[in-house]
């Protein structure tokens, strides 16, 4: 596909914040907690959003919910994402979220998970456009902060309504829209349809971020070219690879791609991530979380398959830290020997 030489994206205003680098880290439950968002921001994310917080959970005072909403002093602009279908719960959730100090409140209407859809939340809301409007209006009325929305392109192939939902969102006061170019029925299968994202972009005058299947600088530029969006949001490609954000940032600015990390640089980030998880969640929870993150960081490296299998068997925080150190520092020796 012919992609014209990119002109740097101009960025946009979101309430009092100016989004100079319209490259968002996608909210991912169980992954984009504060420790990982901090790392992603350093590598180039210009915008971060917390994991989804169920609106019914916010007034129950659970420590876990509080931790999910914790944002860093160095982490702005940042949004807190709330989900639900009952305007009353969402109103409360918006007030609660505002008091945690974010720059904006993001409403999730993209989650395809059954448990969430059953309560007519997440992407199931897209089937009920009148409720979409009521939910947005309730949140907009409850907060002084800008309200943003994340959607899929519709419920299924036959009922795509992305352009209509985008217009409803704008009319109800949403100030930035993110579109994941899949229907709910697609879950994470098939390919994201970037043209459908373009339908939303063409229907509104608020900034639109395109999301789905961006894996590198080239795909980011291609998506911008196809959809005409104001920015991009990257999710799964960042797992174990925050460096991809530096590459995407360079691509959308029309700059050359940065060099990939050396083994020593990779280990420094893995170590930082592990220690920050332990500090944020405590060693017991961190020990569970690193079983996802650390193997992701090893993807594509020599000996990765054996390492992953062995790492899952490690028990205890110190043993995990030591196993990771041995593997990632061993990469440095392999490189020197080559
Ligand atoms: C493990 C996982 C958890 C996710 N959790 C959330 C979430 O809490 N809120 C949300 O809006 N989207 C969530 N998503 C969807 C992502 O934000 C994103 O829309 C999707 O992964 C497509 O982008 P990608 O192709 O760049 O990964 C999640 C995705 C994954 C893989």
Image (cartoon, grey):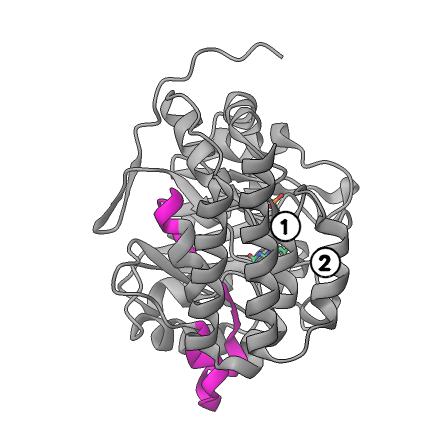
Give neighbour class at mark 2: few <14, some 14-19, many 20+ (Cα, 10 Å): some
Q: Residue drawn at (29%, 75%), measured in percent from left and top?
A: 99
Is residue 78 shown in magenta? no
Picture layout, residue 45 above or below residue 202? below
User: Which is nearer the eye, 67 or 162?
Assistant: 67
Give neighbour class at mark 1: few <14, some 14-19, many 20+ (Cα, 10 Å): many
* Image coordinates for residue 164, horizontal then vertical, percent: 57, 42
Picture layout, residue 254 above or below residue 57? above
What residue is pinned by disc 2?
A: 308
Determine if the C-beta at disc 1 is less than 8 A from ligand 1. no
Quarter holding ligand 1: bottom right
- Whether residues under marks 2 and 1 lie with C-beta atoms below 8 angstroms apart, the answer is yes
Asked whether residue 174 appears in the rendered view, the answer is no
* Image coordinates for residue 162, horizontal then vertical, percent: 60, 41
* Residues rendered magenta in the picture: 41-68
Is residue 44 shown in magenta? yes
User: Which is nearer the eye, 141 or 38?
Assistant: 38
């Amino acid at each position: 596909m012919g992609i014209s030489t990119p002109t740097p994206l101009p960025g946009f205003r979101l309430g009092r914040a100016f989004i100079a680098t319209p490259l968002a880290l996608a909210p991912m439950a169980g992954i984009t907690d504060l420790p990982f968002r901090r790392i992603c921001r350093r590598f180039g994310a210009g915008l971060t959003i917390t994991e989804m917080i169920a609106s019914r959970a916010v007034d129950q005072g659970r420590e876990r919910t509080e931790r999910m909403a914790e944002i860093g002093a160095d982490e702005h602009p940042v949004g807190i994402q709330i989900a639900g279908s009952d305007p009353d719960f969402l109103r409360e959730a918006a007030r609660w979220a505002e008091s945690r100090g974010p720059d904006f409140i993001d409403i999730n209407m993209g989650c395809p998970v059954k448990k969430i859809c059953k309560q007519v939340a997440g992407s199931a809301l897209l089937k009920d456009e009148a409720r979409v409007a009521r939910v947005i209006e309730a949140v907009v009325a409850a907060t002084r902060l800008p309200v943003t929305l994340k959607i899929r392109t519709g419920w299924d192939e036959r009922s795509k309504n992305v352009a209509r939902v985008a217009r409803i969102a704008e009319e109800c006061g949403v100030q930035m829209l993110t579109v994941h170019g899949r229907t709910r029925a697609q879950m994470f299968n098939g390919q994201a349809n970037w043209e459908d994202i373009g339908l939303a972009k063409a229907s509104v005058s608020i900034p639109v971020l395109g999301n789905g299947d961006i894996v590198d600088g080239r795909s980011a530029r291609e998506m911008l070219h196809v959809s005409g969006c104001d920015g991009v949001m990257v999710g799964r490609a960042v797992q174990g690879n925050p460096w991809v954000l530096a590459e995407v940032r360079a691509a959308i600015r029309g700059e050359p791609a940065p060099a990939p990390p050396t083994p020593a640089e990779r280990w420094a980030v893995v170590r930082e991530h592990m220690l920050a998880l332990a500090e944020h969640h405590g060693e017991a929870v961190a020990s569970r979380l690193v079983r996802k993150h650390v193997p992701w960081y090893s993807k594509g490296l020599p000996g990765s398959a054996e390492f992953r299998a062995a790492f899952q068997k490690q028990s205890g925080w110190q043993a995990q830290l030591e196993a990771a150190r041995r593997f990632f520092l061993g990469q440095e020796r392999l490189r020197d020997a080559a």
